[in-house]
Amino acid sequence: MNMNLVTLLYLLASVCFIQALKGLSHPRSAQRGNLFGMAGMALALVTTYALIAKQAPVLGAGSAWLLGALIVGGGLGTLAAARIEMTKMPELVAAMHSLIGLAAVCIAYAVVAEPAAFLISTTGLLPYSNRAELLIGACVGSITCSGSVIAFGKLAGKYRCRLLQKSPIIYAGQHRLNLMLALTMIGFGVLFLLSQNWLPFILMTVLAFALGVLLIIPIGGADMPVIVSMLNGYSGWAAAGIGFSLNNPMLIIAGALVGASGTILSYLMCRAMNRSFLNVLLGGFGQNAPSATHPEHINRPVRTASADDAAFALANAESVVIVPGYGLAVARAQHALKELASKLASQGIQVRYAIHPVAGRMPGHMNVLLAEAEIPYEQVFEMDDINLAFSQTDVALVLGANDIVNPAARNDPLSPISGMPILDAHRARTVIVNKRSMAAGYAGLDNELFYMHKTMMVFGDAKQVIEAMVKALD
């Protein structure tokens, strides 16, 4: 294939990726953004396949192997996407990041083993620039792979392995150990850079895998959305680093886009949670989060109510703000919620939705959930745009949310979430909270909101409770 044509096709694919990111920045254009992303990836794959197939005699592999890999990989991806539930999407994202990191490591090893096969060197000795690119790609890819596996396990929350449990693992000298591993890893990388010897390259990779695990295990489950975003950035930088070694502009551009977007998103989410971005990079994020509710709050009385009581309060309100949380996603109650909102609106009640930046298990989780039910985006407001309205709101309906409406973030300077921006649901005249039980949220903290006199606790599955409310409004 003519290289000018390859460059042009890669450029078109890059434009598609940029348009995809632009489209995904807003729910209204998200579908168009996805289409651009799929078109760009299809174009990049076809172009790369044609380019490599032409070089098959040099690579020593037939194009049938390449086609088979595309079919198997595409088939597995399609199957995973078709079977995954909305609530499991963050886990899928973490799993995909681990594969990207592993791919970067495998490519780095392949290039070091056979430089001639990738048209980099015919003598077997790699230029110093390529060695630097490969060791960076291998290190970042290894950290991304192992860190993403740990993040996947913490998000799933169903594995008995201590490393994969939601609660953070804290021990004395943690940061010193991480620093020593990082410096040793860099030392082996320098040795590889100077000698192109296999032993330091292998040891560097092993230490990078170990460092990825140690950086993520002190992270609590509540902070996983930021970690997933950070690992997304890592995977992009790993791909970009390998792209330089392969002299593949498509891989460089795509990796840089993913790396930059993931890093920027992580930074914005850290600001939204009043956390240090440096702590994310060093693996100290969320390490002070407790793993259980405060004992002084156990057995405190709460004001319980039925779905009929909640429906009566909603029917007599003039304005309602709905706060969706992870419990709504678990119950898949978004369609029932739309029906409830439509009932209220038909009675002249103003209905709005309040979205916290880190509600759910990944950025934009609640936005996607509401968009799936075709809830008008004009009714959906981000935290900064809706918080002032809570004090003039008759009823705040909190559905499966916990940490993002916890007043301790504002009122308790000793709380692990102190200073974290929250939705001010506690300022509404009446608060209705739907939860399955009084169990703590993902951060392991009790919530003072649940014990307020103005709060009505309606226990049960979100979908069943909302459907009961709709029935009571008839």
Image (spheres, rainbow, N blue to C red):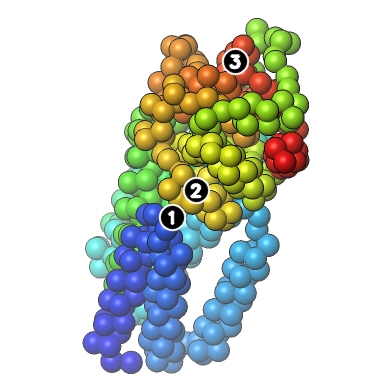
The picture places residue 147, in percent across and down from the top left corner, at: 51, 46
Q: What distance separates the C-alpha of mark 2 from that of mark 3?
A: 28 Å
In-front residue for pair 9/144? 9
Label 1: state its secondary structure: helix
**Residue 165 shows in this picture:** yes
Dot 2 or dot 3, earlier in sequence: 2
**Can you identify the residue that label 1 sits on?**
27
Q: Which one is in front, 356 or 467?
A: 467
Callout 3 amino acid: Lys
Circles 2 and 1, Cβ within 8 Å, touching? The answer is yes
Does residue 47 lie above or below 139 as drawn? below
Q: Secondary structure at mark 2?
A: helix
* Residue under the image location 41 percent in, 39 percent down: 382
Q: For marks 2 and 1, give the CA distance.
A: 7 Å
Q: Is residue 31 left or right of residue 22?
A: right
Density class for disc 2 (Cα within 10 Å; few <14, some 14-19, many ≥20) is many
* Residue drawn at the location 30% of the way across and 77% of the way down: 12
Report the residue marked by disc 2.
367
Question: Residue 179 shows which numbered tag?
Answer: none
Residue shown at 68% from the left, 23% from the top: 457
- The image quadrant of residue 461 is top right
Badges 2 and 3: C-beta atoms under 8 Å apart?
A: no
Q: Is residue 287 left or right of residue 251?
A: right
> Any mark on residue 454, and which?
3
Residue at the front extreme of this rendering = 347
Residue type for callout 1: Pro
- Which percent across, then down, holds residue 67? 54, 85
Left or right of 312 in this view: 267: left
Q: Earlier in the sequence, mark 3 or mark 1?
A: 1
Using residue 30 as the reference point, say whether residue 466 is left or right of it: right
Type of residue at label 2?
Asn
